[in-house]
Image: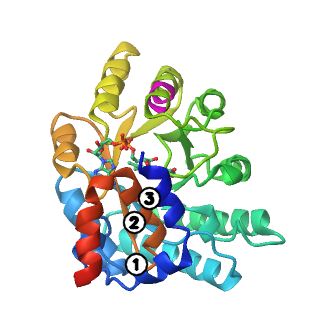
Amino acid sequence: MLRQPILLLARSQGVQRLVSTMPVSSSVVRSYVPGETTADAVAATSTLVEDGLRVSLDYLGEDTTDAALADATVAAYKELLADLAAKGLAPQAEVSVKLTAIGQSLPDNGHKVALENARDICRAARNAGTTVTLDMEDHTTTDSTLAILRELRKDFPETGAVLQAMLRRTEADCRALAYEGSRVRLCKGAYMEPERVAFQDRADIDKSYVRCLKVLLGGQGYPMIATHDPRMVKIASALASRFGRRPGTYEFQMLYGIRPEEQRRLAAAGESVRVYIPYGTEWYGYLMRRLAEKPSNLAFFARSLVSKK
Ligand code: FDA
C-alpha cells in the first residue's frame, strides 16, 4: 500500500517546498484544481452547471495557526458566495468549508473562532440562497467539528456534515445524524489515521462504507454519497431502490477532474450529482491526498515536477 507512505512524505517541509514551486497551471495540479481565483472557480461552476451538474466549492487552505489567514478565508468565501448569487448560480452551487482553514487549529480558542467564522459563512450562504457543508479532517478534529455542526444547525439547519467510513466511530455517527433534514456526505476518508481509530484495510473500509450507506439511506436525512468507486456507486443505487428513495432525496458527489464521464452518465440517468471544486493557491495538501489515492499518477506527477509544466 503506497497511500500511507505518500501521506507521510507529504508532511515533509522539503517536499512541500519542492512541490509548491509548481505553477497551478501545471497539468498535474490543473487536473484536480481549476484555478486560483474566484473567477476561475465561478467559470468552472458555470461549465458544470450547464452540463446538468451541481457543485460544492472549497476555497483551499487548512491547518492555519494565523487568525488573519482565517479571516482572509472567510472573506474569500463571502466574495465567492456574492459572485455565485450575482450570476444566478447559487441554487446549484454550495460551499464546502474546512474548519482548520478558519481557525479550528488556533492554539487558545480555536474551537470558538472556527464556530464564529463558520456562522459568518453560513449567514452569507443563506443570504446568497445556498448552503454550507463542513468538510471533515483528521480524527483529532471530529468531535470539535461535530460539536460546531450541532451549534450551527440551531440557526442554520441546512448545514451539511461529512463522515468518513474509515473511522471506527462513523457507523454510530451516521445513526446519530440520520434524522430529517440532516445533510450528510459519506466518504471513505482521505487522512492517515492510526489503527486504534480507523480501519486500515481497503476491504474493511468498503464494508464500513456499505454499513453506513444502509444507515443513511434507510434513515430520514439527505445522504450525499461521495465516492468514485464503481462498486460503491452500484451498491448505493441498489440500496436507494431498496429503501424506496427517489432521485433527488439523495445525491452522488465526486471530485472535480475525477471520473467526469461517470458524473455525466449518472446525471443523464436522472440522478442528482454534485462536483466538489477546490480552488485557490493552497492546493498542496489537497493534491497530495489525491496522489496518495491514485499512486499510478506518481510517474505523471514526477514528470510534471521536473518540467514544472
Ligand atoms: P477509491 O479510493 O477506492 O477509488 C475508487 C476509484 O476512483 C479508483 O479506482 C479510481 O478510478 C478513482 N479515483 C479515486 N481517487 C482518484 C484520484 N485521486 N485520481 C484519479 N482517480 C481516482 N475525505 C475526507 O477525509 N474528508 C472530506 O471532507 C472529504 N470530502 C470529499 C468530498 C467529495 C465530494 C468526495 C468525492 C470525496 C471527499 N473526500 C473527503 C475524499 C474521500 O474520503 C476519498 O479519499 C476519495 O473520494 C477516494 O475514495 P473513493 O471513494 O473514490 O474510492
Q: State the SS at label 3.
A: helix
Q: Which mark is residue 1?
A: none
Look at mark 1 in the image and give the residue it sits on.
Answer: 19
Q: State the SS at label 2.
A: helix
- Mark 2 CB lies closer than 8 A to ligand 1: no
Residue 206 among those drawn in magenta: yes
Vertically, is 223 above or below 48? above
Residue 24 among those drawn in magenta: no
Q: Residue at x 57, y 69 (%)?
A: 62
- Report how far apart the C-alphas of labels 1 and 3 lie in the structure: 13 Å
- Mark 1 CB lies closer than 8 A to ligand 1: no
- Report how far apart the C-alphas of labels 1 and 2 lie in the structure: 10 Å
Instruction: Read off the magenta span.
Output: 205-209
Image quarter of the N terminus: top left
Q: Is residue 185 left or right of residue 111?
A: left
Q: Is residue 145 visible?
A: no
Residue 167 locus on image (x, y percent): 60, 38
Look at mark 3 in the image and give the residue it sits on.
Answer: 289
Look at mark 2 in the image and give the residue it sits on.
Answer: 287
Front of the two marks 1 and 2: 1
Residue 202 locus on image (x, y percent): 44, 34
Q: Badges 2 and 3: C-beta atoms under 8 Å apart?
A: yes
Q: Badges 1 and 2: C-beta atoms under 8 Å apart?
A: yes
- Mark 3 CB lies closer than 8 A to ligand 1: yes
**What kind of residue is marked 1?**
Val
Q: What is the number of callouts on the image?
A: 3
